[in-house]
Image: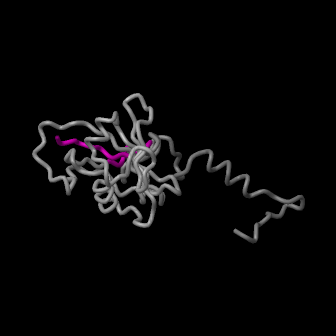
């Protein structure tokens, strides 16, 4: 049995990875592939939190047995048969860093080696880039979505909006004697 999994980040449209995974692939093998492809840190505890289609937790799989088995003893197919429709994969348990993994059976897919999940589609940079402030075009607010050379619709002639002008006026307060006040730390 071959599964198609989609790895996403909550609330971010500009990122996904799609893999074809053999059902016999252990969660540990999947973890190693995800870690290598997305440059997750190697020195962190990991956990797969399995979720049913209604969002309830069906199991927790880690390097240590958390009640449902260890990642090296549980295959993707076994987890799905236990009720998992998706996972939250914590690649850094201590700092609660995770990606979402949705699982669906793909009968049309070719055979996939259980030792090597196959990356078939990718979009966006690795998750660490989003932590460092990267914002995908799809995730920008509507008023900030314009391409180079296009004029933003709600900007005035000077290139900044009225809120910025008000903030600038507040910064240039004057003292009682009419002199401007300067902050030495600016």
Does any portion of residue 9 appear in the rendered image?
Answer: no
Examine the residues drawn in magenta and state their main secondary structure: strand
Please report the residue visible at 20 percent of the width from the left and 50 percent of the height from the top: 120
Image coordinates of residue 134 in percent, x first then y, are 44, 56
Decide which of 31, 16 is in the foreground and name it.
31
Location of the N terminus (image quadrant)? top left
> Is residue 20 toward the left or the right of residue 176 in the image?
left
> Is residue 102 toward the left or the right of residue 145 in the image?
left
> Is residue 117 toward the left or the right of residue 134 in the image?
left
> Looking at this rendering, what residue extends furthest in the right direction?
176
Q: Is residue 105 magenta?
A: no
Please report the residue visible at 46 percent of the width from the left and 57 percent of the height from the top: 92
Q: Image height check: is 84 above or below 21?
A: above
Does any portion of residue 52 appear in the rendered image?
Answer: yes
Q: Image height check: is 56 above or below 66?
A: above
Image coordinates of residue 96 in percent, x first then y, are 51, 52
Colour scheme of the picture: one colour
Decide which of 67, 81 is in the foreground and name it.
67
Q: Quadrant of residue 34?
A: bottom left
Q: Image height check: is 65 above or below 105?
A: below
Location of the C terminus (image quadrant)? bottom right
Please report the residue visible at 55 percent of the width from the left and 50 percent of the height from the top: 160
Q: Is residue 13 magenta?
A: yes
Q: Quadrant of residue 8?
A: top left
Decide which of 11, 29 is in the foreground and name it.
29
> Is residue 178 toward the left or the right of residue 31 in the image?
right
Please report the residue visible at 34 percent of the width from the left and 33 percent of the height from the top: 83
Q: Image height check: is 90 above or below 106?
A: below
Image coordinates of residue 67 in percent, x first then y, are 44, 45
Segment tinted magenta in the rendering: 1-16
> Looking at this rendering, what residue extends furthest in the top direction?
54
């Amino acid at each position: 049995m071959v599964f198609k999994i989609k790895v996403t980040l909550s609330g971010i449209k500009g990122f996904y990875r799609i893999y074809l995974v053999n059902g016999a692939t252990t969660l540990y093998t999947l973890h190693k592939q995800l870690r290598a492809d997305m440059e997750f840190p190697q020195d962190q505890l990991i956990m797969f939190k399995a979720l049913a289609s209604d969002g309830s937790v069906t199991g927790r799989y880690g390097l240590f047995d958390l009640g449902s088995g260890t990642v090296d003893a549980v295959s993707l197919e076994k987890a799905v048969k236990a009720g998992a429709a998706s996972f939250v994969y914590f690649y850094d348990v201590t700092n609660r860093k995770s990606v979402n993994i949705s699982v669906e059976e793909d009968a049309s897919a070719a055979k996939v080696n259980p030792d090597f999940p196959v990356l078939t589609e990718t979009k966006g940079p690795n998750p660490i880039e989003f932590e460092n402030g990267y914002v995908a075009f799809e995730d920008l607010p509507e008023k900030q979505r314009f391409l180079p050379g296009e004029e933003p619709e709600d900007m005035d002639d000077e290139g900044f909006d009225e809120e910025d002008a008000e903030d600038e006026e507040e910064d240039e307060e004057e003292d009682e004697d009419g002199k401007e006040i300067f902050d030495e730390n600016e």
